[in-house]
Image (cartoon, helix red, strand yellow):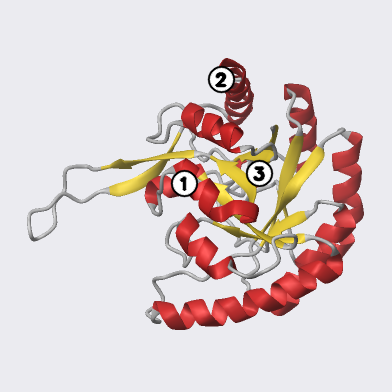
Amino acid sequence: MRFSVFTASTPEWTPAEVVANLKEQGWDGVEWRVVDQPAAAPSSDGTAAVGFWAGNRATWPLTGLEESVPEILRLTREAGLGMSGIGGYAQASDHENVERMLAATAALGAGQVRVTMPRTDTGEDYPSVFARTRADLEWVVSRAAEHGVKALVELHHETITPSASAARRLLEGLDPAHVGAIHDLGNLVNEGFENHRAAFELLGDYLAHVHVKNARWVTDGSRRDDGSLVWRHEWATLRDGQADVGRYLTDLREHGYDGWVTLEDFSTDLPLADRTRDNLAWLHSLVGANA
């Protein structure tokens, strides 16, 4: 397995700082975040706030992405890092921007790029959204084949593909050379958990990529009108979340997966540099202990 970091989880670093720090810490690669992110609200001192989803300094804008490709390549190559893929946010239905992302992925030699799925809280019935997305995905796969890359569908809570079963149903019959699934350990704590080995077997050739983070369910003791406790999920450190990361890596290896494992730790218990360094050391220890 090779380990990379998704830059959604490194908001305080510029792209140059990302590659310098990941190289120094011993990571194998980077997964660049690409999106036109919303402006961040100013912090209390009036400076621009930094956050995972807004004000993330390690994000390349989707608008003008073509002009950024040479700089992305230069930074990544000079640091001696691989690209585990591109973390895109273009919806499958947004053909113009999916085409842009596929073309950039090919130009970067990154091999694969995430294409996002619709949410399930829009009020539209699931079968209609699913059928429309399947048609969009067929177009995406045809364009991915033309570019010689692979489009990735992430197992993500609150979307139409929260589980391996849902993703397999959506992908069934499409060419696994040009479309696959991202199995995401942390997202499955929130929604969509299935026995990992069964899920890997179910996905089969569609198991294309892996994201690792952790999460947990918490309550502040508040209750609904009917008296039941209110629970919510939150991100946690790799060690402190509900998912068993060590068992997960063992299951992946025993299944025969030997691809990229991309870290996206959205906890804030440790400063960013300490967090990334500690995560890599712990992952290496888990792989070594279970080899």
Q: Which mark is residue 290?
A: 2
Q: CA distance from mark 2 to mark 1?
A: 20 Å
Mark 3, residue position:
6
Q: Amino acid at mark 1?
A: Ala
Q: Is residue 154 left or right of residue 152?
A: left
Q: Earlier in the sequence, mark 2 or mark 1?
A: 1
Mark 1, residue position:
198
Q: Which mark is residue 160?
A: none
Q: Position of residue 126 (x, y in %)?
A: 41, 77
Residue sitting nearer the eye, 278 or 173: 173
Q: Amino acid at mark 2?
A: Asn
Check disc 3 and report its element: helix, strand or loop. Answer: strand
Q: Earlier in the sequence, mark 3 or mark 1?
A: 3
Q: Position of residue 110 (x, y in %)?
A: 81, 51
Nearest to viewer (mark 2 / mark 1): 1
Check disc 2 and report its element: helix, strand or loop. Answer: loop
Q: Quadrant of the C terminus?
A: top right
- Report the residue at 12% width, 53% height from top: 228
- Report the residue at 42% width, 62% height from top: 158
The crowd level at tag 2 (other Cα within 10 Å; few <14, some 14-19, many 20+) is few
Q: Position of residue 285 (x, y in %)?
A: 59, 17
Q: Is residue 136 left or right of residue 145?
A: left
Q: Quadrant of the N terminus?
A: top right
Q: Earlier in the sequence, mark 3 or mark 2?
A: 3
Whether residue 13 is visible here, answered yes or no, is: yes
Q: Amino acid at mark 3?
A: Phe
Q: CA distance from mark 3 to mark 1?
A: 26 Å
